[in-house]
């Protein structure tokens, strides 16, 4: 009680109240906290939605049999693919893919029907336009899925031996081999949104003080560096936590994400990640001289953070060096936590490495920025 | 409107009378919500005229300028600039504000070239004009320096050059010399006078009334209306009073004694540095009365001079009649006991080097509790750097500092809580209300909750802002922000107070109130380090140091400093001050000649022999000296001499 009274009459409270009043007065920041996260989440989430329809499929059917027509029918059945061209040769099909007129090309060999009837593995070839990696991955996934289903219709269940499935797909990626796509975009985008908003908003509140010149006056007061920063962090933290709630509501309502894990744990770990973002933002503010510089520097930091995190492009697709580097990306750890808690039901025991990493990043960023904050005037 | 009509002969526009007036304002009005900032302003400015606007903070000067510049629309009334609406005339307009309108990342030359490019100045004209302008204001050697690295005075001079590069017909200047040192602002005005002679119309607002005396006509604005309009002579005569310049041992007690006497002869008593200006209807009678009164109180008189009133006398007197003298309310001091020890600040061999630039060179200072120490010097001399090192914001490169008995860690919280600091620029948060600002500073300095209302009220009352405490700070005029900022920096009753140009941009009445408060704090034992460009204010200091290029070149009490000036100061009135000044600066050493309002001040080693020569020189150019008499050095004369002599070395 006594402690509380001291806190609320003390310097820290005066500082926090001032920051809150400034933030509430600043319509821009309130807007920045609400509007972009919503739009980003909707745009990223909807645009990266793996539900794809109407992909252009080209077919080079050397077999010209009932079986081959059945396979093509199975592919177009659920509107994922539409056959836009039949080509005479594999080479012509390849040209179509190369020209970007079709997304996938299916090559059915002449002995397809015969091999099927002899219960042998019948290889078909699929050419996928890998320039648009996402669509390519999705196309690949669908072809495999549909071919598998077609397989199951052929074999007399239960065969028990998947090796002897009648049709064997050999997928060849043109231009961009070895890519994986997943359904996990929305949790990743939540991480991206928190990183962008958190670091930008916190860096602008710190840099504004430097821009208008009140920082010097503030440093002349008895308030310690950590108190000044803490006062800046607390109201932002509360507002950003609101962003987490907003993002998870959108994820639940618009994208129908299951939130299988403990939601309070998700909130707690998101809060931990917010400290990392705010620490990063303040660190950027101590590097820059003015608002313009801080925005540009934040691009320099944020873009690689996002790229390395696996939020958009899978970590598995990176070269080994970057795959290891991604361990030093706090967003990677957060995205992993978010995916695990939203899509699976896992506990702390499975996530402790990521949690530890986030804690270390939070302490590191905040510590460094507090130190730099005092030192920067000279 | 004006109490009398201006004499056309005084206006004497150089161009023919049939030509279009440079500026016509007809019943101009501007309201912000309920607040009427300008209430029916009418004035006509002729081409080539230098027109001065003076008035207290919040009189509506800035609003008028913004309307003239076409930045803002008037609520009602007619505005025309060069016979057109302001927005259409803007290619022929130059507009300069208190804030530097320069690109800090560009060099001096690049800034000029940019301004020229915007207004499509032909290359040939630029090549001729740019060096001329830079040379006029002494910026020639700095063509390659980035504008951000210039001192405040240099920035304003460069901004003026940028405004002049395109040969505008009309120049609008909204207090451009705020925070500019006495030498630089004279260079600034010398250039203005020169371009006005070429036919440029200049409308200038200034907080320095000696500058306003250089204008052909002056409008005194108050409460959004022109209260008086006319030449300097008109305004003076309108008072119908004469001025006694009284120098006495102790100005403050002498003022009290004279005030207390209640004699009807003393229409107004104003302190002005080390002297009292007493406005009396009859000089001889008044002088007798002053001598009698002070003799009664046994206050020795050093000298009494009779002279015409200055513009500042007129200004202060008019505003006092309006009842706008800010109230003096003693600060509610709670602090018991004086600070321990005697010496508040000492430095030995203080140095600061930025890269290859030596900003501060071997400064030794000693400031005691209860002492007001003035740190004076040109813009960029290193005053602010010294202050920042003293308060621990900037580590010194070498040297020893002792602050409040502390030598090692100057930024410790308990040291900080004993220090008050008001920096040169924005101390308040523009996006908070006045009350929120004050509550914040109370809280952050740990003023106990129960004492806060009393202290905040004191600030509001002193600033005359009761009932307006919920106004957003951004909407306050500059001078009022300064007052609130001062209040915010003293609420925690600091033992040591740093004030970096606290009165810059503050009107004369409020400045007097400021200094009364500063003296109060010193009297109660606070050590105060203050910088200012109003040299007459510096007379309030017990001790002072003059800094030039990072060094303290002269130190002592105001009388020591003035006493150590070489030569004899002669005040002259001539038919053409500007031409006389230009000529004499050429013939004598430049530091010996300066313009003070409508007078010339000249330092001569031997007036009796030199004056006839000067008279001859001027006569050859058709300039007549009306009057020339020896006067004592003021601090401003001393400043100009010290700074300019040191720069020559």
Image (spheres, coloured by chain):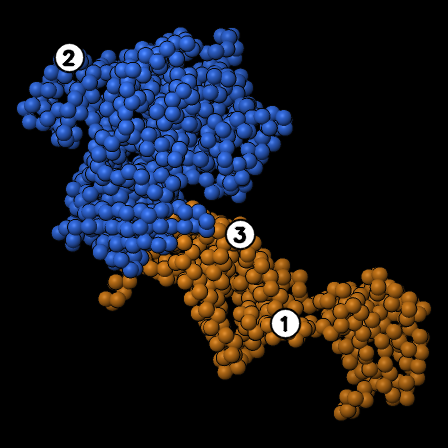
Chain colours: A orange, B blue
Could you say where residue B106 lies in the image, as x and y percent from the top left?
54, 41
| Residue identified by numbered label 2 | B284
Depth check: give the residue in front, B582 or B536: B582
- Left of B553 or right of it: where is A243? right
Res A156 quadrant in image? bottom right
* Subunit ID for the residue under disc 3: A
Q: Quadrant of residue A81?
A: bottom right
User: Residue visible at 25% across and 63% down?
Assistant: A5
Q: Which residue is mark 1?
A: A322
Say whether mark 3 and mark 2 are on the same chain: no
Q: Residue, x 50% and y 30% (percent of image)?
A: B134
The numbered dot on residue B582 is: none
Residue B288 percent location from the top left of the image:
11, 16
Residue pictured at 22% horizontal, 30% vertical: B563
Label of residue A293 in the image: 3
In the depicted structure, whether residue B280 falls above or below residue B406:
above
| Quadrant position of the N terminus of chain A in the picture | bottom left
Q: Which percent across, then down, holds residue B509?
A: 26, 29
Q: Residue at x 49, y 68 (%)?
A: A273
Evaluate whether label 1 is on the same chain as label 3: yes
């Amino acid at each position: 009680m006594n402690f509380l009274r001291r806190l609320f009459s003390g310097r820290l409270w005066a500082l926090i109240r001032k920051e809150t009043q400034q933030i509430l007065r600043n319509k821009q920041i309130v807007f920045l906290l609400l509007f972009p996260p919503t739009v980003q989440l909707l745009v990223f989430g909807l645009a990266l939605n793996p539900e794809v329809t109407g992909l252009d499929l080209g077919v080079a059917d050397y077999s010209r049999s009932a079986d081959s027509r059945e396979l093509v029918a199975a592919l177009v059945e659920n509107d994922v693919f539409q056959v836009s061209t039949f080509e005479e040769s594999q080479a012509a099909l390849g040209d179509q893919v190369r020209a970007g007129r079709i997304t996938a090309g299916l090559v059915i060999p002449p002995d397809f029907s015969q091999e099927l009837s002899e219960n042998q593995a019948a290889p078909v070839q699929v050419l996928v336009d890998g320039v648009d990696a996402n669509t390519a991955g999705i196309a690949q996934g669908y072809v495999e899925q549909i071919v598998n289903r077609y397989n199951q219709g052929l074999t007399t269940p239960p065969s028990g031996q998947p090796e002897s499935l009648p049709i064997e797909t050999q997928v060849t990626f043109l231009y961009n081999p070895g890519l994986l796509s997943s359904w996990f975009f929305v949790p990743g985008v939540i991480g991206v949104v928190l990183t962008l908003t958190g670091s930008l908003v916190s860096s602008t509140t710190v840099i504004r003080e430097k821009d208008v010149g009140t920082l010097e006056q503030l440093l002349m007061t008895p308030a310690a560096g950590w108190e000044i920063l803490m006062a800046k962090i607390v109201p932002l933290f509360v507002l950003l936590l609101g962003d987490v709630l907003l993002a998870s509501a959108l994820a639940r309502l618009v994208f129908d994400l299951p939130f299988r894990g403990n939601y309070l744990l998700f909130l707690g770990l998101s809060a931990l990640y917010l400290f990392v973002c705010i620490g990063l933002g303040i660190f950027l503010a101590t590097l820059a001289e003015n608002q313009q510089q801080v925005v540009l520097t934040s691009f320099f930091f944020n873009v690689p953070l996002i790229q390395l995190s696996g939020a958009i492009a899978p970590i598995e697709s990176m070269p080994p060096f970057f795959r290891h580097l991604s361990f030093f990306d706090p967003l990677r750890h957060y995205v992993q936590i978010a995916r695990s808690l939203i899509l699976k039901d896992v506990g702390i025991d499975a996530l402790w490495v990521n949690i530890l990493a986030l804690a270390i990043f939070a302490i590191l960023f905040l510590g460094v920025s507090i130190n730099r904050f005092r030192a920067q005037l000279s | 409107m004006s109490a009398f009509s201006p004499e056309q002969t005084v206006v004497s526009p150089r161009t023919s009378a049939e030509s279009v007036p440079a500026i016509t304002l007809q019943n101009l009005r501007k309201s912000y919500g309920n607040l009427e900032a300008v209430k029916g302003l009418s004035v006509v400015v002729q081409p080539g005229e230098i027109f001065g606007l003076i008035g207290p903070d919040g009189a509506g000067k800035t609003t008028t300028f913004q309307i003239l510049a076409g930045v803002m629309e008037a609520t009602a009334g007619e505005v025309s600039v060069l016979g057109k609406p302001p927005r259409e005339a803007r290619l022929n307009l130059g507009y300069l504000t208190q804030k530097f309108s320069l690109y800090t990342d560009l060099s001096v030359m690049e800034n000029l070239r940019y301004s020229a490019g915007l207004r499509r100045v032909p290359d040939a004209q630029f090549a001729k004009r740019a060096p001329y302008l830079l040379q006029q204001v002494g910026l020639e050697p700095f063509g390659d320096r980035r504008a951000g690295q210039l001192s405040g005075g240099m920035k304003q001079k460069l901004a003026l050059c940028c405004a002049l590069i395109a040969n505008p017909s009309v120049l609008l200047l909204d207090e451009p010399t705020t925070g500019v040192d006495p030498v630089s602002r004279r260079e600034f005005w010398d250039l203005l006078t020169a371009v006005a002679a070429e036919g440029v119309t200049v409308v200038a607002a200034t907080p320095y009334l000696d500058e306003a005396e250089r204008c052909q006509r002056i409008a005194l604005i108050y409460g959004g209306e022109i209260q008086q309009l006319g030449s300097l002579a008109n305004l003076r005569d309108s008072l119908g009073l004469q001025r006694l310049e009284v120098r006495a041992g102790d100005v403050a007690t002498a003022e009290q004694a004279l005030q207390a006497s209640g004699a009807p002869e003393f229409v107004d008593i104003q302190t002005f540095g080390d002297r009292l200006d007493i406005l009396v209807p009859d000089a001889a009678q008044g002088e007798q009365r002053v001598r009698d009164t002070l003799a009664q109180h046994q206050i020795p008189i050093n000298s009494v001079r009779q002279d015409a009133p200055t513009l500042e006398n007129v200004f202060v007197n008019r505003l006092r009649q309006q009842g706008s003298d800010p109230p003096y309310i003693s600060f509610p001091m709670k602090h018991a006991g004086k600070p321990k020890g005697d010496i508040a600040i000492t430095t030995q061999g203080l140095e600061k080097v930025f890269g290859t630039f030596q900003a501060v060179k071997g400064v030794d200072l000693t400031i005691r509790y209860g002492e007001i120490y003035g740190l004076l010097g040109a813009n960029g001399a290193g005053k602010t750097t010294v202050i920042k090192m003293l308060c621990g914001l900037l580590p010194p490169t070498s040297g020893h500092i002792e602050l409040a008995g502390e030598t090692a860690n100057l930024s410790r919280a308990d040291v900080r809580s004993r220090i008050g600091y008001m920096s040169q620029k924005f101390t308040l948060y523009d996006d908070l209300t006045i009350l929120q600002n004050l509550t914040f500073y109370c809280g952050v300095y740990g003023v106990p909750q129960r004492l806060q209302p009393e202290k905040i009220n004191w600030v509001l009352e002193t600033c005359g802002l009761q009932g307006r405490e919920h106004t957003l700070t951004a909407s306050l005029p500059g001078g009022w922000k300064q007052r609130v900022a001062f209040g915010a920096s003293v609420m925690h009753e600091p033992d040591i107070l740093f004030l970096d140009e606290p009165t810059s941009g503050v009107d004369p009445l409020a400045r007097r109130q400021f200094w009364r408060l500063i003296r109060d704090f010193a009297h109660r034992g606070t050590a105060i380090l203050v910088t200012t460009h109003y040299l007459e204010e510096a007379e309030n200091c017990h001790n002072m140091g003059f800094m030039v290029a990072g060094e303290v070149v002269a130190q002592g009490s105001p009388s020591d400093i003035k006493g150590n000036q070489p030569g004899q100061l002669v005040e002259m009135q001539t038919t053409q001050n500007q031409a006389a000044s230009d000529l004499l600066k050429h013939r004598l050493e430049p530091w010996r000649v300066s313009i003070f309002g409508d007078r010339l001040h000249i330092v001569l080693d031997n007036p009796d022999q030199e004056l006839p020569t000067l008279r001859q020189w001027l006569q050859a150019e058709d300039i007549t000296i009306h009057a020339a008499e020896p006067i004592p050095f003021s601090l401003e004369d001393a400043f100009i001499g010290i700074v300019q002599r040191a720069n020559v070395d």
